[in-house]
Image (spheres, grey):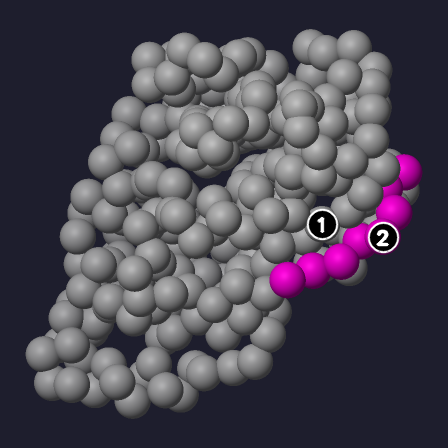
Amino acid sequence: MEDKALYDQLGTAYDATRRADPYVVKRLAHHLVTERPGNYLDVACGTGNYTIAIATTGVNMTGVDQSALMIEQARAKESSVRWHVADATSLPFPDNFFTGALCTLAIHHFRDIPAAFRETFRALVGGRFVLFTSTPEQMYGYWLNEYFPVALARSCAQMPSFEYVSEALRGAGFTNVRTESYEVREDLQDLFLYSGKHRPAFYLSPRVRAGISTFSNLTDRDELESGCRKLAADIQSGRIGEVINSYRHEGGDYLFVVAEK
């Protein structure tokens, strides 16, 4: 199961700051679409931003999410996509139905990742399963750790390692698991957790933080207030540049994971 309560809560203001980023859409479509025509599935699609963005390129898309609130918002935005309320471990589709599947920034909210991967494998006739996620190793390199260490530690703890994800994919039956790293770009339009890598003032906005589960669900009020004060002071003094530089690392900020059936 996904964390339904959390995403029902996030869904009330999710689209205020969360939208499909063109570059991420381009890379998802590059990895996902191997033949046309075909039917493609977005697992844990949320309010459907990436589902709809890929559908507008001429791809037949279906979106599924456990949050009825998010599916309601997705359906209001685009009627050409087929929308379903369902858990990732119990998809309402027959065997061998889809040509490919994707899942963006959601697997860390699955209660049973191997079961969700097995269910996705069952629903695919063939093709690719494309994940966009991050790993604990990548997240330890976020300069946000300087200001919100407890929240980031909690977020890292719930994020599956690449080794775990790879093993779960192979255990479900997928093969040829490979990756492509992603570095946050300065023009990123989807304001997920590390979207402010180059724009630290983003995190001072309650509106931005409301769409990020780490801040809305994992950050204590005292740490949030003290962290924001420290961040604001460092932005004002210019010290933030030193902090950002001290957290530079190899390996990217997020990861595209591609597996095949």
For marks 2 and 1 on the same chain, the one whose residue lies earlier in the sequence: 2
Res. 239 image quadrant:
bottom left
Q: Is 222 on the left-hand or right-hand side of 214?
A: left
Q: Quadrant of the C terminus?
A: top right
- The amino acid type, in three-letter code, at marker 2 is Asn
Q: Is 242 on the left-hand or right-hand side of 152?
A: left
Q: Which residue is mark 2?
A: 176
Depth check: 22 or 207 in front?
22
Magenta extent: 173-180
- The amino acid type, in three-letter code, at marker 1 is Val
Residue 92 on image: x %, y %? 69, 10
| Residue 177 visible from this viewpoint | yes
Tag 2–tag 1 contact (CB < 8 Å): yes
Q: Is residue 175 magenta?
A: yes
Q: SS of the residue at dot 2?
A: strand
Residue at 31%, 50% (x, y): give it: 189
Residue 75 on image: x %, y %? 40, 13
| Residue 136 visible from this viewpoint | no
Residue at 45%, 83% (x, y): give it: 248
Q: Is 170 on the left-hand or right-hand side of 8?
A: right
Residue 71 on image: x %, y %? 44, 17
Bin the neighbour count of mark 1 within 10 Å (Cα to Cα): few under 14, some 14-19, many 20 and up.
many
Q: Which residue is mark 1?
A: 258
Residue 192 on image: x %, y %? 38, 50
Residue at 40%, 88% (x, y): give it: 246
